[in-house]
Amino acid sequence: MKALLEKSLLLGLGTLSFTKEKAEKFLKELEERGEVTTAEAKKLFYELMEKGEQEKSALKEMIQHQVNEVMNNLGYIKKEDYFTLEERVKELEARLGSQE
């Protein structure tokens, strides 16, 4: 049963492309053909959703890392760093202004 699911995923369904509706439909078809029981289908559904969330999270993290790397290579700074520097400049200006 699990091998069948893995083959299906490898044939282009991909966990990331599995929406909740697609997964439910796919597992219902397997159940109707007698390839999985209702309990197995439920278990597989939750496993698919969990794996999908894990992969989505990993993909998001990888994209964020790549974007940060590109931004750093181009010489851009993070918004937080900009605001921190802006506050420091204001403080320094205030100190210099009070010394005159």
Image (spheres, rainbow, N blue to C red):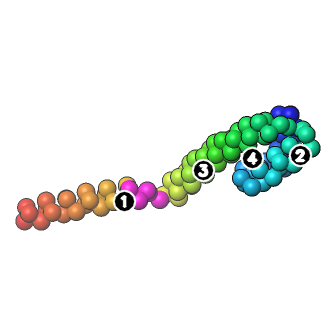
| Disc 4/disc 1 C-alpha distance (Å) | 38 Å
Q: In front: mark 2 or mark 1?
A: 2
Indicate the secondary structure of the residue bearing disc 2: helix
Asked if the residue at tag 1 contacts the one at tag 4, i.e. Cβ–Cβ closer than 8 Å, the answer is: no
Q: Please check the rendered image and state whether residue 77 is part of the magenta-colored stretch, yes or no.
A: yes
Q: What amino acid does circle 4 point to? A: Thr
**Measuring 26% from the left and 59% from the top, which residue is drawn there?**
87
Label 4 SS? helix
For disc 3, the marked residue is 60
Q: Which mark is residue 32?
A: 2
Which residue appears at 91% of the width and 40% of the height?
Answer: 34
The correct choice, above or below, for 86 with respect to 29 in the image is below
Measuring from the top left, give residue 43's x and y in whole percent: 73, 37
**Label 3: element kind:** helix
Visible in this render: residue 35?
yes
Residue labelled with disc 4: 15
Q: Amino acid at mark 3?
A: Lys
- In the rendered image, residue 37, in percent from the top left (x then y), is placed at 83, 37
Per the model, the C-alpha gap separating discs 2 and 1 is: 58 Å
